[in-house]
């Protein structure tokens, strides 16, 4: 079997650090695509696995961008040299997938968190290390992916920048545009102004929401939220969040996106919600609760985004100057992956992106 030597950041113990090792990766199966990675974003889902461990040695990373090296014989529409952005994986054959709702895929958890292909096999040759995280494992110089989680993009923009779009940004923007479908003049509060939250701020501004209220404990992020479209901000260390929101709006808000994972913020999201409003969180647990007054509390997955159509939409908005996500990004060399993770956890950096080529 022909294999490829790759450099990959391997998580062997919970808490890290990640160690860059040389592994052998199989060539693509008939329905797979071998991608030479240019860059990978770091998402809080990756950091959660680093902190908690995966129970076995794994390669994380799920916001890859790169160039097609080789496509399996059954892959149509992708050729060597194509520029691609990688996103989450779906099975492609269940009922929701056939209805173009991959975010509702019946095998979503298995496909993205199983650390194997859907048939149980693994692309790392003769190794105890597992890959295929989100159908990619992009903390590496090369990865195996499928057409289902690949978005072909034009070569006009640098892949290093586009890597940021694969998960968190599409989740934040997608929640506002695809789930809330906010209209002009509807009010929006965003708890947590990291990458997901700031993407939601920008999407709210694009859709004409108002007021848009950003809530965080990091002043630098709150300042950036105002620059990107928030009309008001709340520093929840010093201000009562619910009282401040009600003072701004005179009542409550129509929509809340909670990116914090904090139980108290979840409670507040319901408290400040107008009758008929929707509060969403990004825990990834697909659930829905009906609250008094026709209110709803939901959990969202990937912002109900179909990557092949939504990521190109975000790119168009960026080129038009409406979605300046480049302001969130800080680049790191691949070898500095642990420094990048530390910077993200501290709140100093909103969206770290690793540059892979030549490392």
Image (cartoon, helix red, strand yellow):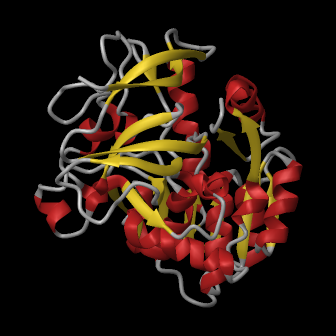
**Residue depicted at 48% across the width and 29% down the height:** 60
| Left or right, 288 with reference to 105 | right
Dividing the picture into quadrants, the one containing residue 185 is bottom right
Q: Nearer the viewer, residue 292 or 62?
A: 62
Picture coordinates of residue 55, whole percent (x, y): 39, 12
Dividing the picture into quadrants, the one containing residue 18 is top right
Picture coordinates of residue 13, whole percent (x, y): 52, 9
| Left or right, 158 with reference to 280 | right
Residue 278 in view (yes/no): no
Q: Is residue 265 above or below residue 251?
A: above
| Left or right, 350 with reference to 295 | right
| Left or right, 282 with reference to 358 | left
Picture coordinates of residue 68, whole percent (x, y): 43, 51
**Residue depicted at 65% across the width and 34% down the height:** 358
Dividing the picture into quadrants, the one containing residue 294 is bottom left
Residue 273 in view (yes/no): yes
Quadrant occupied by the C terminus: top right
Q: Is residue 218 above or below residue 122?
A: below
Quadrant occupied by the N terminus: top left
Q: Is residue 231 above or below residue 83?
A: below
Q: How many marks?
A: 0
Q: Nearer the viewer, residue 43 or 192?
A: 43
**Residue depicted at 63% across the width and 39% down the height:** 357
**Residue depicted at 53% across the width and 12% down the height:** 14
Picture coordinates of residue 130, whole percent (x, y): 35, 20
Q: Nearer the viewer, residue 251 or 287?
A: 287
């Amino acid at each position: 079997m022909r294999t490829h030597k790759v450099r990959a950041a391997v998580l062997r113990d919970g808490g890290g650090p990640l160690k860059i090792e040389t592994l052998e990766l199989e060539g693509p199966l008939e329905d797979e695509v071998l991608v030479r990675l240019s860059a990978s974003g770091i998402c809080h889902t990756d950091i959660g696995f680093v902190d908690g461990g995966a129970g076995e040695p794994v390669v994380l990373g799920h916001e890859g961008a790169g160039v097609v090296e080789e496509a399996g014989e059954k892959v149509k529409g992708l050729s060597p040299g194509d520029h691609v952005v990688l996103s989450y994986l779906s099975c492609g054959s269940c009922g929701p997938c056939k209805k173009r709702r991959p975010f509702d895929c019946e095998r979503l958890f298995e496909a993205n968190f199983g650390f194997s292909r859907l048939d149980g096999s693994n692309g790392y040759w003769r190794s105890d290390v597992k890959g295929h995280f989100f159908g990619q494992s992009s903390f590496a110089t090369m990865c195996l992916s499928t057409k289902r989680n690949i978005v072909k993009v034009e070569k006009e923009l640098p892949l290093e920048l586009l890597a940021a779009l694969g998960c968190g940004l599409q989740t934040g923007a997608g929640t506002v545009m695809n789930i809330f479908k906010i209209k002009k003049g509807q009010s929006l509060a965003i708890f947590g102004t990291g990458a997901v939250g700031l993407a939601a701020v920008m999407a709210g501004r694009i859709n004409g929401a108002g007021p848009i209220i950003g809530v965080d404990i990091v002043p630098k992020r709150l300042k950036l939220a105002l620059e990107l479209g928030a009309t008001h901000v709340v520093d929840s260390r010093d201000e009562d969040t619910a009282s401040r929101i009600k003072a701004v709006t005179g009542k409550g808000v129509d929509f809340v996106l909670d990116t914090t994972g904090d139980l108290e913020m979840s409670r507040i999201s319901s408290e400040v919600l107008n009758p008929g409003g929707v509060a969403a969180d990004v825990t990834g647990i697909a659930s829905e609760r009906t609250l008094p007054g026709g209110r709803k509390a939901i959990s969202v997955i990937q912002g109900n985004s179909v990557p092949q159509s939504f990521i190109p939409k975000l790119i168009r908005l960026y080129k038009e100057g409406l979605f300046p996500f480049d302001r969130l990004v800080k680049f790191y060399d691949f070898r500095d992956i642990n420094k990048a993770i530390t910077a993200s956890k501290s709140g100093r950096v909103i969206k770290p992106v690793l540059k892979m080529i030549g490392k």
